[in-house]
Image: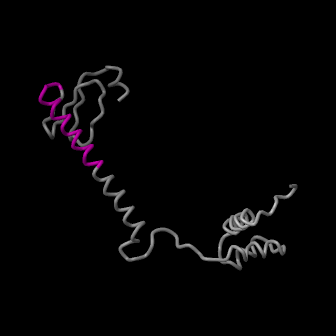
Amino acid sequence: MADARRGLFDVVVVWRFDRFARSAGIDFVSHQEALDTSTPMGRAMFTIVAAIAELERNIIRERVVAGLEYAHTNGTRSGKPVGRPRVIFRHDQVFELRNQGVPWRQIAKICGVGVTTVRRAYQSMKAKRGVPKPGE
């Protein structure tokens, strides 16, 4: 394509026209579809095919987005929710255990969640209760 942009040749010939919709400032000839952009009719057909390809892509995108929204709202076909299921645990228990000096890993094991989740829960509870940060 760099050579085409530099104008090193005038025509590109391909076997099939799939999604060649970029303008390189050169003529395009497709052997299989009998498409030649060096003619007015060929340019018109090229524009129409490129517009149809873009329309098809946009319709597929809309369908995917709608499907994802439906799945998030209603769950999957099997009735299971989308994504990792949430583990329910008591944030106040995390706060109490940590204030008693229990290590993060042990609290995580007791609650059945990861260490990062435990730390987030602790920070959340600390913020809600208005506990000052060290050094304040």
Q: In the image, residue 78 lies at what x, y percent?
A: 38, 77
In the picture, measured across the screen, residue 25 lies left or right of residue 106, that is left
Say how the picture is coloured.
one colour
Measured from the top left, where is residue 25 in percent x and y? 28, 24
Instruction: Name the residue located 79 percent from the left edge and 72 percent from the top edge.
Output: 98
Q: Which residues are magenta?
A: 38-58
Viewer-nearest residue: 108 or 19: 108
On-image quarter of the C terminus: bottom right
Q: Quadrant of residue 92?
A: bottom right
Q: Position of residue 27 (x, y in %)?
A: 22, 26
Q: Residue furthest top?
A: 7
- Count the marks: 0
Q: Is residue 84 left or right of residue 72?
A: right
For this orientation, the residue located farthest to the bottom is 110
Quarter residue 7 falls in: top left
Is residue 103 covered in magenta?
Answer: no
Q: Is 115 located above or below residue 18 in the figure?
A: below
Residue 23, how many percent across, how many down?
A: 29, 29
In the image, is residue 7 above or below residue 55?
above
- In the shown orientation, is residue 36 left or right of residue 80? left
**Which residue is at a point 15% across and 35% down the rendered structure image?**
45
Q: In front here: 129 or 88?
A: 129
Q: Residue at x 64, y 77 (%)?
A: 89
Q: Quadrant of the N terminus?
A: top left
Closer-to-camera residue (40/81): 81
Secondary structure mostly taken by the magenta-highlighted segment of the chain: helix
Res 112 → quadrant: bottom right
Q: Residue, x 70% and y 77% (percent of image)?
A: 109
